[in-house]
Image: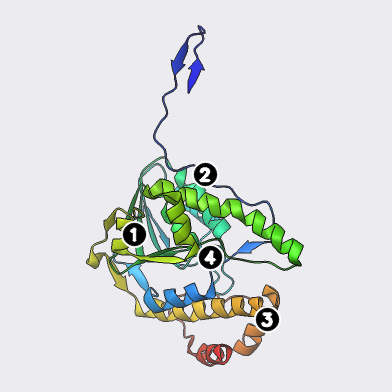
Amino acid sequence: MTMNSPSGARRPRVMAKARPGAMPLPIRQDVHAFTKPSVFDEWGKDAAGIRAVDRGDNVLTMFDIVGEDFWSGGGVTAKKVTAQLRAIGDRPVEVQINSPGGDMFEGIAIFNVLREHPQPITVKVMGMAASAASIIAMAGDTVEIGAASFLMIHNCWVMAIGNRHDMRETSEWLEPFDQAMVDLYAARTGQDAKIVAKWMDAETYMSGSQAIERGFADALLPADAVKVDEGAKSKDRTVNDLRAMELQLVSAGATRAEARDRINKIKGTPGAAPEATPGAGDDWSELSGLIASLKS
C-alpha cells in the first residue's frame, strides 16, 4: 500500500505489527450468546477453585463468567476491564483466566478492549478458557497455559425464539460471527481456517500441550503458579449449577426472568443476586437440595 507525500511523490506506508484486528459486534439486541450448560459442568468438575499463587498490581483476574452475572453479582465485562486497564496505565499487563465463558459478544468486546492496550499482554490460562473466554485469551501477545488446563472453542451458541423464518434469519445472522472467530483463531495459530472451523463445529477441548501444539498457546505455566482454593471451589460449583439450571429452564421455554424467579422461590431467597461473590466465605450448603431437585 502506498500514500502520497506533500510533494506528490509516492512512498511506501510502514505498517506496524499489531494484534489481530477488532472483531464485529452485534447490533441486534434480541439474541444473546451463552455458554452451554454442559460447559459449566466441565468447568465445575475440572477447573472450579483454581486460582493464581501470585498477583501483582498490573494483573487482571478473570475467574468468573464473561458478562454480568445475576447469580454472583459479578462477571467479567468490557466496562470493568476498561476501568482496570485505565488504573494500570501504560504498563505491561497480565491477564489470568479461569472461566467457562459466557456472553460471546461481551467476550468480543473485551478482546477489542485488550487489543488496544499499548503495552504487551501476557495471558495465563489457570484452569479453563472456554467459549467466550477463549476469544479473550487470543488478545495476549503471549499465552501461557497450565498442563492440566483446557482451552475450548465452539460455534456461537444462542437462544432464540420464533418461527422457521425467524430461525433461518438468526442462523444467517450468526454466520459472520462464527467466521470472525475462525479468522481470529486461524490468525493466532497459523492453522488452516477449514481445520479451525471443524474444531469449532466439534466443540473442541484442548489440553495445555494440545493448545501449544496447535498454536493457541505459547508455553506451559509452571505447576507451582496455580493453586486450588477449596472455598472458592465450592462456591464456583454452586453458582455454576445455578447458571446451568437457569439455562436449562430457558431451553424448556421459560424466559430468563421466569427461570430466575422459579429458582429463587425454590432456593427460598427471592430477589437479587447474593451480595457476596463466590470465594467470600459465606455458606451456600442450603442450595444442595435445590440443585438436586432441579437435576432430577
The residue closer to the viewer here, 29 or 231, is 29
In the rendered structure, which amino acid carries the disc numbered 2?
Answer: Ala
Under tag 4, what secondary structure?
Answer: loop
- Sooner in the amino-acid sequence: mark 1 or mark 2: 2
Q: Residue tagged by mark 2?
A: 22
Residue 195 screen position, x and y as percent: 43, 55
Front disc: 3 or 4: 4
Disc 3 crowd rating (10 Å Cα; few below 14, some 14-19, many 20+) is some
In the rendered structure, which amino acid carries the disc numbered 4?
Answer: Gly
In the rendered structure, which amino acid carries the disc numbered 1?
Answer: Ala
Instruction: Give the number of the disc on residue 261.
Output: 3
Disc 4 crowd rating (10 Å Cα; few below 14, some 14-19, many 20+) is many
Q: How many marks?
A: 4
Front disc: 1 or 2: 1
- Sooner in the amino-acid sequence: mark 3 or mark 4: 4
Q: Residue tagged by mark 1?
A: 211
Front disc: 4 or 1: 1
CB-based contact (under 8 Å), mark 1 and mark 3: no
- Sooner in the amino-acid sequence: mark 2 or mark 4: 2
Q: Give the CA separation, mark 3 to mark 4.
A: 21 Å
- Sooner in the amino-acid sequence: mark 1 or mark 3: 1
The residue closer to the viewer here, 61 or 83, is 61
Residue beneath the point at 60% across and 54% down:
175
Q: Give the CA separation, mark 4 to mark 1.
A: 20 Å
Give the quarter of the figure containing the C terminus: bottom right
